Amino acid sequence: MNDSTNRALRLGTRRSRLAMSQSGQVAEAVRELTGRPVELVEITTYGDTSREHLAQIGGSGVFVSALRDALLAGEIDFAVHSLKDLPTAQPEELALAAVPKREDARDALIARDGLTFEQLPDGARIGTGSPRRMCQLNAWAKALGKRVETVPIRGNIDTRIGYVEKGELDAVVLAAAGLSRIGRIDVATQLLSPDVVLPAPGQGALAIECAAVNAALAAQLAELDDPVTRAAVTAERSLLAALEAGCSAPVGALADLSPSSRLRSSRGGPKADEQAFTELHLRGVVGTTDGNTLVHLSTTGHVPASPDDLSTPLNMGRELAAEMLAKGAAGLMGERAL
C-alpha cells in the first residue's frame, strides 16, 4: 500500500443518506487534522440489502461486517460506523481509533398533527423496527392508561417519516442524532426523555475504525476521540456485552456524567477540558416487547481522571448487568447472543 502523505485517505461508509452525511463530517475533520485529502468509498452491507426485520437477522454486525472486510483487505484506510451498530467484541486486528463527541442520544417521536406521545389516541400505531423501543413505548403507554400498537418497519429516515406523512402510521420513533445529522430534526414532535425511554447502548455516537497495524493513522485519528463520550459508551456497551445481548435485543442503556464535571483529554486538542469528572451514572433496562415486564436498574461510580483508564466504566457495566440478570433479565431478552 502506498503510504505517501499525499495519497488520499479512503474512508469506508455505508451508502445511506445518514451514513454519507456523518462520514462526510468525519472526512472533513480528518482533512483538517491530517492535511490529506479524504475520499468516501461507498460499501453495501448485508443490513442494507436484506429486507428482513433487524430482529430476525440478528442486528449485531449486519451493518458493519462488509466495512470491516474492506479494512482488512486494504481496500479502505478507515471506516465510520454508528457505534450502536458495532458488535461489543472488538477484533484484535482492528483498532477503535476514535469515538468523537456524541450527538443527542435520545429517541425522537415524529407524530401526525404535531402530537406528543402523551397526546396520541388510544390504539395509536407507532412504527419502529427496534424491540428496545417497542418494550419501552408499550410500558409507557400502559403507565398512561392506554394502548399503542408498535408496527415493525424498515427503510431509511425519509421512508420512515413518509409513513406518518402519508397517514399510514400515527407516529414513528427514530434516533434524534440521525435526524440532526441529515438536517431534519425539525420534524420531531417530541424528544423522548431517557427517564421513560432509554436509548440503545452507544446511540448518538460514532466509531472510527482502522487496521491495528496502521499505528500511525490510528494515532492521528485518536485526536478526534472525545474521552467523555468514550467513557460513557464504554459503560453502556460493557452492560450490553455482559448481558450477552446483541444489537437487536430489547436492551436500553445510558451513561451520564455529572453536569458540572468533564474529563480532561491527555491527547490535547482544542476540545480538551481542564476539569476532571469523577462521577458516572449508568442506567439500564431490559424488557419484553409487549411492555408487561421490565427490569430497570442504575448505578453510580467514581471514574479515574485519566481518559485512558476505562476500568471503572467497564466494571460498572458488568456489575449492573449482573444485577439485572439476577432480577430476571435473561428471560426477557429472547435468544441471547453467543
Image: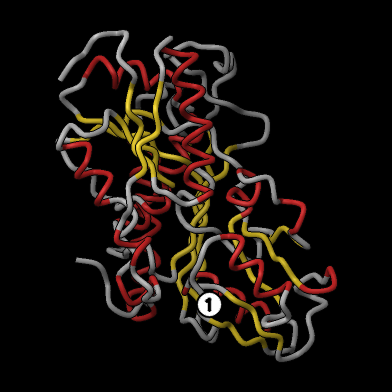
Circle 1: residue type:
Cys
Residue 305 higher or lower than 173, as above or below? above
Q: Residue at point 58% right, 38% down?
A: 257
Rendered image coloring scheme: secondary structure
Identify the image quadrant of the N terminus: top left
Residue 300 higher or lower than 224, as above or below? below
Q: Residue at point 54% right, 16% down?
A: 272
Q: Is residue 242 visible?
A: no
- In the image, 97 versus 112, the foreground residue is 112
- Report whether 233 appears left or right of 109: left
Q: Which residue is mark 1?
A: 135
- In the image, 197 versus 224, the foreground residue is 224
Whole-percent x, y for residue 17 in the image: 53, 49
Residue 168 higher or lower than 278, as above or below? below
Whole-percent x, y for residue 241 in the image: 30, 56
How busy is the neighbourhood of tag 1: few (under 14 within 10 Å), some, or many (20 plus)? many
- Locate residue 141: give its quadrant: bottom right
Identify the image quadrant of the C terminus: bottom left
Q: Residue at point 71% right, 66% down?
A: 110
Q: Residue at point 49% right, 52% down?
A: 299
Whole-percent x, y for residue 278 in the image: 52, 30
Quick one: SS at disc 1? helix
Whole-percent x, y for residue 268 in the image: 47, 11
